[in-house]
Amino acid sequence: MHTLKSTTLRAAGGLVLAAHLAGFDDGSRAAQPANSAQDASALRAPADVYGIVNLTPAQALVTHINASGQAAFEYIGLDYNAHVGFFDGQRLIHPIAPAATVSFLGALNDRGELAFVARYLDPAQPWSTSLQPYRWSAARGLARLPSLAAAGDNWIPAINNNGIIVGASYIDHDPATGRGVRWSAANRLTVLPRPPGSDLSYAFDINERNVSVGSVTDAGGINHATRWDSANRPTVLGTLGGVRGAIAMYTNERGDIAGMLDGGTPDARAFLWSPARGVATPGPNAVVVGLNEAGEIAGRIVSPDGANRAFLYSRARGLVDLHPASLAVSEINSLNDAGISVGVAWAPQGERRAYRWSRTGAAVDLNTRLLNPPAGLTLASALAIAANGDIVAESSAGLVLLRRGGGGTNAPVLGPINFPETALNR
């Protein structure tokens, strides 16, 4: 299950992101429409507009958005460390204290549960030498998950709506000790079985049937795409025609699997596999970034000269070139189940612009769809799109949430930004 890159939070005892992240006066204040003029405009505006919610002026490294339009993001703080933030639709939260930790976002499900890894900065504190796995939700608060070894790091790429998390846990700091694992909704750790003779293993994704996918590496260093059923029984799909192997990265409810063949080589290319029809590829040099429930994959065709082109691919329609003819470069970052993809395109002069594409190839510069944008605001890249059409985007003011149909916040999007101390969520 891949949330699309998808209650009160006071009970969790988390930390509200500082006002410089939300533009709020204090941690208990909810996001409101930007102003009465925007409210009036929204009433008469067409559906294809977006209200703007300011999330953080900091650089965001990873973003996820769920079906409810809740967003999770990893950003670089004033301490130059990475931290995880969460927007619940009204307010911003730190699921783990940023002053004491460095944290890296893993995944977000449609129930508002976060999975991530973190370590404490104070060497005198437990769990300061390795990245440990955590789960957080408004209802259950923060919980550290078990790992294979206190000295080993952990990695989390996915959580499904049943609360099951998949990823990898390491025996120590040696990357060769990674083992694919699953954490149950009750936080029990299970090592995913590996075929005899295999070495490394990773789980990349899990669907709502609790089927997970990933890869195992044999003694010769070849990756084999692997599927684990709901009882954790492995089926090795193999190299799927790749010379250096195959890595399964995404799966949907139909059992389709998408990933990469010969990753890290000049021959790297995307694949789409289905139980009944086997493997198909959109062509050479394709990089996949998402798979939806319709069996469509999206990504970019990599060009040696850097002129990458956005694409959508399915068995039914083949390769759809989404690249706008007037632009130099285009790339997809996220895809939803309606076949709507978002990403970035570069003009010949080098300016980046956030774009949205329909499955038929119609391209829209999202800068032309903003409801009453502040003067000077530009959207540089659309990073993730939700099932409801909300979008997380990189802008000249930092990370913003674009709410489809209007609806924003009273937080200033541009202008002076203050950096007060983080306050406890009261």
Image (tube, rainbow, N blue to C red):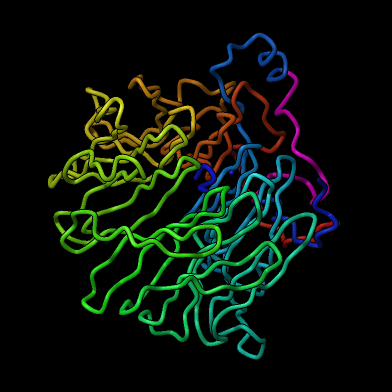
Look at the image and say whether residue 23 sits in the magenta stretch. Answer: yes
- Res. 89 image quadrant: top right
- Tally of numbered discs: 0
* Majority SS type along the magenta span: loop
214 shown above or below 126: above
Comparing 154 with 407, the one in front is 154
- Res. 325 image quadrant: top left
Q: Which residue is the extreme one toward the bottom?
A: 124
Q: Percent x, y for residue 141?
A: 77, 62
Comparing 378 with 156, the one in front is 156
Q: Which residue does the image show at 46% across and 40% down from the upper left?
A: 254
Q: Which residue is the extreme one toward the top?
A: 44
Look at the image and say whether residue 50 sits in the magenta stretch. Answer: no
Comparing 326 with 111, the one in front is 111
Q: Percent x, y for residue 256?
A: 40, 43
Q: Which residue does the image show at 65% across and 42% down from the upper left?
A: 70
Lateral position of residue 262 relative to residue 138, left or right: left
